[in-house]
């Protein structure tokens, strides 16, 4: 059996020296190629869990492993994020002064990919998400759905195996949201990606292999989809 | 690079204002330095046009006009084996009766060769010969409506204008030349004494050795090559220092402008910076990006400063009476201006860039 994409062991995250407990001992494994929805009320620790899985932050207790690397202060987390993880944010987080293609190039810049190669790969990815025609548009000129497509292309730039989404359809109308999820899941099938998304939307969650519900920093429910 | 530009232009007015801040600082360097340089060059040109090889002034006086070289020292200089000829030179600013702008009064001995500097095709009339005769610069003559043959009062005495001259030194053309004896009398100087001496060498190739030998014999004197007479004016060093203090103050203001702009820019872009970090950008990459933006702003400010400086120098020169100054825009000044703008950009952007690089990715992404 291959190494899990994510492995959390009694994971804790506290803020303000323990006054705020965001995660109070979470243990879970996400297998390579699995799709997971993380649900739960606000303040339940969803975003904190996603941040730790994304190596954006380090735990205050327990262990977090992402594709065999421990998320800890002495790991090169910048490198880990650049190589292994692709993020999709609720508000797309495209840089407004950059074109679609340049936004897609951001992760490749982190790895020092040569300019020509970056451009070639960005064009290829924009084509795959149906955005070639908008490659030289700056993001304020794109619609919400178009922005999220560019954001998906950006998440795939360095061929990461793990895609993390924080409410990726949260700012889209339901039809556009469905289209974006269709795109994401078709890419997942082609590439064998692991996808973990935080969502409030049950329809989005129903399309995932597995649903995890957090409550007060703990796992309240962990259920495989009935097939 | 293009992205750096686009980031700068998303707040056009703010960027323009910080460019202006740097432009004023660099402009002040360019304007004042080029005027100072122009003045120095005109002093050197004043010495060079006499055809002399060396100039002698007194040590420890801020302006050679305060120096008094006694007759016996002049004679001792004359005895040096490599001296072919010498000329005494005096110059003082004076005001005319009737109170116009100050004019330069220069003393020359008609028997000495340096007076020939005024005899050129542009000259009308002749060189002065007698104590009561005077030569007038072309600019002053035009201003006062004087011509050859007219009289003029100076130092409570009447002079006859025998020649109108034009040289390559602007302020000299706004002055007058009188007989050395008349000058000594007006300034109550000892007979045969002088403020400066121009030396003509038999063998100009031995200029260095001759200057060294004379300096050893006369430790109270400064022996300068004619092309460096301006370094005998120690007051110019004070003016240079003054220019730097003003320019430095303007540059600090420019740096604070960049600091403020970049701090605002960083605080507006916290979430963007968090996004860059999420995709693996290191703190150092973020630091470089913000520094590049600050440097680009200040370089644009430096280029604009060249324009501001040249325009400022030209405007200031119009204020100088008789057009007596010509700014010299030497490359060195622009190199200094560019270096100053780079320094300003770096200093101004360093702290914002450091702050941006230290943002925690997770918190930066949460930032609204």
Image: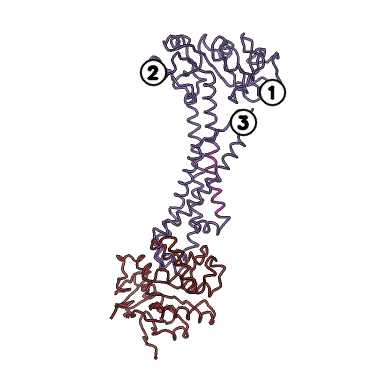
Per the image, the residue denoted by label 3 is B320
Per the image, the residue denoted by label 2 is B209
How packed mark 1 is, by other alpha carbons closer than 10 Å (few <14, some 14-19, many 20 or more), is: some
Q: In the image, which disc is placed on residue B142?
A: 1
Q: Main secondary structure of the magenta part?
A: helix
Q: Is residue A23 above or below residue B156?
A: below
Q: Is residue A16 above or below residue A173?
A: above
Q: In the image, which disc is placed on residue B206?
A: none
Chain B as rendered: colour: purple
Sequence-wise, which precedes: disc 1 or disc 2? 1
Chain A as rendered: colour: red
Chain letter behind tag 2: B
Residue B18 counted in the magenta span: yes
Tell me where the magenta segment starts and ends, as one range: B15-30
Residue projecting furthest to the left: A1
The answer to which quarter of the image holds residue B108 is: top right
């Amino acid at each position: 059996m291959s190494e899990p994409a994510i492995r959390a062991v009694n994971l804790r995250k506290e803020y303000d020296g323990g006054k705020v407990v965001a995660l109070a001992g979470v243990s879970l494994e996400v297998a390579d190629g699995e799709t997971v929805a993380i649900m739960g009320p606000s303040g339940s620790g969803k975003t904190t869990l996603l941040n730790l899985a994304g190596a954006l932050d380090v735990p205050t207790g327990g262990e977090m492993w992402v594709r065999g690397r421990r998320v800890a202060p002495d790991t090169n987390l910048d490198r880990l994020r650049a190589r292994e993880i692709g993020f999709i944010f609720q508000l797309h987080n495209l840089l407004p002064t950059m074109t679609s293609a340049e936004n897609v190039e951001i992760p490749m810049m982190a790895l020092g990919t040569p300019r020509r190669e970056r451009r070639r790969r960005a064009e290829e990815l924009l084509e795959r998400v149906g955005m070639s025609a908008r490659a030289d548009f700056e993001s304020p000129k794109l619609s919400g759905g178009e922005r999220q497509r560019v954001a998906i292309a950006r998440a795939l730039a360095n061929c990461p195996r793990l895609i993390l989404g924080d409410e990726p359809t949260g700012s889209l109308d339901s039809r556009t949201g469905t289209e974006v999820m269709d795109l994401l899941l078709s890419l997942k099938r082609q590439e064998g990606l692991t996808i973990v998304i935080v969502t409030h939307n049950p329809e989005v969650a129903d399309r995932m292999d597995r649903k995890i519900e957090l409550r007060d920093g703990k796992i309240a429910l962990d259920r495989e989809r009935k097939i | 690079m293009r992205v750096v530009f686009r980031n700068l232009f998303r707040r056009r007015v703010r960027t323009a204002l910080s460019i202006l801040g740097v432009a004023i600082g660099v402009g002040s360097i360019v304007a004042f330095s080029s005027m100072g340089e122009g003045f120095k060059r005109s002093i050197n040109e004043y010495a060079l046009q006499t055809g002399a090889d060396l100039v002698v002034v007194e040590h420890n006086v801020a302006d050679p006009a305060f120096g008094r070289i006694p007759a016996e020292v002049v004679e001792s200089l004359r005895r040096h084996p490599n001296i072919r000829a010498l000329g005494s030179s005096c110059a003082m600013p004076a005001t005319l009766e009737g109170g116009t702008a100050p004019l330069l009064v220069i003393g020359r001995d008609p028997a000495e060769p340096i007076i020939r500097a005024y005899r050129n095709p542009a000259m009308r009339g002749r060189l002065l010969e007698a104590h009561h005769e005077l030569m007038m610069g072309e600019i002053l003559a035009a201003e006062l409506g004087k011509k050859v043959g007219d009289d003029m009062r100076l130092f409570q005495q009447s002079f006859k204008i025998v020649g109108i001259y034009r040289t390559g030194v602007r302020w000299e053309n706004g002055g007058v030349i009188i007989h050395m004896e008349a000058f000594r009398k007006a300034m109550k100087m000892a007979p045969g004494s002088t403020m400066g001496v121009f030396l003509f060498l038999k063998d100009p190739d031995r200029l260095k050795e001759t200057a060294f030998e004379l300096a050893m014999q006369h430790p109270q004197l400064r022996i300068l090559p004619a092309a460096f007479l301006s370094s005998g004016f120690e007051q110019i060093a004070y003016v240079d220092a003054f220019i730097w203090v003003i320019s430095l103050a303007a540059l600090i203001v420019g740096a604070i402008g960049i600091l403020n702009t970049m701090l605002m820019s960083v605080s507006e872009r916290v979430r963007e910076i968090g996004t860059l970090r999420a995709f693996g950008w290191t703190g150092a990459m973020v630091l470089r990006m913000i520094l590049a933006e600050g440097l680009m702003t200040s370089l644009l400010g430096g280029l604009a400063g060249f324009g501001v400086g040249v325009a400022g120098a030209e405007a200031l020169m119009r204020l100088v009476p008789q057009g007596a100054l010509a700014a010299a825009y030497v490359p060195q000044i622009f190199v200094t201006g560019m270096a100053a703008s780079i320094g300003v950009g770096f200093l101004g952007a360093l702290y914002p860039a450091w702050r941006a690089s230290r943002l925690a990715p997770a918190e930066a992404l949460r930032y609204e």
